[in-house]
Image (spheres, rainbow, N blue to C red):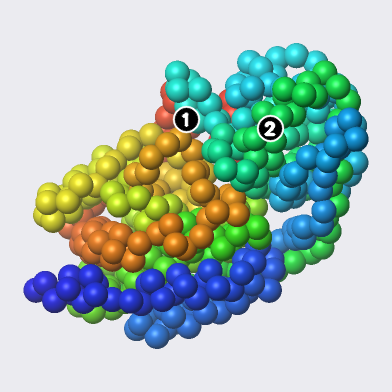
Amino acid sequence: MTEWISETFTSDVGWSHLETLVDIGNRMAGSPGEREAMEVTRDALESVGARNARIDPFEIQGWERGDSTIVAHNTTQDCIALPRSPARTVSGELVDLGYGLPEDFDRDLSGKIVVVSSTVPDHFDRFIHRREKYYYAVQSGAEGFIFANHVPGQLPPTGSVGTADAPIGDIPAVGVSKEVGARLGRRFEGEEVTIEVTCETPEAESGNVHAELGPETDEEVLVTSHLDAHDIAEGAMDNGAGTAMVVELARALAAREDELETRVRFVCFGAEEVGLVGSEHEATRLGADRANVKAIVNNDGVVAGRTLRLHTHGFDELEDAAQTVAQRFDHDISTIPEQLPHSDHWPFVAHGVPAYMVGSEKKGRGRGWGHTHADTIEKLESRTLREQAILLTELTVELARADREIPHAAPEDIAAALEAEDQAKGMKVTGDWPF
């Protein structure tokens, strides 16, 4: 039966939910907007036929934006604070560290304010996350951290700092556009500059949205996303589209519920952008029951490009399932076997749970419009959401087959893979090493 394909390709459920999410405005973790996003997503999952739709709340460290400035030689340079930066004013000699590779921090940076790029050179063998660069700066004694976008267009980037144990970062951190970063390096390197960040850090509440379809089996497949977004933009790509995809998949799977041989649980996490807090909460809540999670389809970065890109974290059976669907539909799906420890699948993968990080192929390196004011809905296409929803619906049904066995991994094997991929050092610096 193929009626579900035509229904999905003509459905406006997912796209309408994306419009609802972006029109909320600020969906920062712990904000009223994030709470509204939870409520409308719970209601949407219920309306498409998923059962037991609910919100599981939890406490978080809140962060509310104030003002931020960079002052250099009586000029004020445009910037935005990075979430969970401490509120503080610091001054120091400006040092432009270029890409901010690990070796660039092998010096005493006491009293300095460092500028680093949001990307790495083409020859470098791995991407270096913002927080890794930040904590190299902290360890080297820097007074302040300036994160310069590598994408042109006067777009300062955001993105959180802080760790699970110390949610508020050690030194003030701001994002600047590519153009401002270049100006700082050209005009003011070696000169004294001042960073001032004001913010509030109240206790706050976030939450995860849950709903279910399929038989009441102990084993389950999780279909996930995150609801929150940075407060400076609509968060359409990151990650309104992922949550819209979850709602669309729930609609399509409800029509195919009699084909599901394993329970499918939908989880839309809160507080991802401030340290994977919602998914850590769920992984901890499950505890030993993580063994019952057969596989995870985590949607974070879908719809940004037309071809799906799936990180499979070394699970051969996930690679096989994805290629089975690609061949069945004669449709490209890109798969990458490496570890990707930067979204809500990770608190589960670290314990050996098989999971996809589902994004999409797009031009250029890094986030593109993501984490900037330019993350808006008109850059996405409803056609792409519908096409990808067809493939991901089929993939979820495939994963839920009783005869589709997907063994878990030993956590030490995940750790070894991270070591082999040269990702372990950075995770240890940021406090994200769970082994």
The correct choice, above or below, for 63 with respect to 426 in the image is below
Alpha-carbon span between mark 1 and mark 2: 32 Å
Task: Say few, some or many: other residues with alpha carbon within 10 Å of mark 2 (under 14 / 14 to 19 / 20 or more).
Answer: many
Res. 335 mark: none
Residue 16 screen position, x and y as percent: 41, 76
Residue 7 occupies quadrant = bottom left
**270 or 332, nearer to the observer:** 332
Q: Amino acid at mark 1?
A: Leu
Q: Identify the residue under disc 1.
A: 418
Rendered residue at 61%/69% (across/down): 25
Q: Secondary structure at mark 1?
A: helix
Say if residue 163 shows up in the picture. Answer: no
Question: Could you tell me which quadrant the C terminus lies in?
Answer: top right
Rendered residue at 37%/43% (across/down): 362
Contact, CB < 8 Å: mark 1 with mark 2? no
Q: Relative to residue 174, is residue 299 drawn left or right?
A: left
| Mark toward the start of the polypeptide (1 vs 2) | 2
Residue 365 screen position, x and y as percent: 45, 35
Residue 193 screen position, x and y as percent: 86, 30
Q: Amino acid at mark 2?
A: Gly
Q: Identify the residue under disc 2.
A: 181
Say if residue 111 shows up in the picture. Answer: yes
**352 or 172, nearer to the observer:** 172
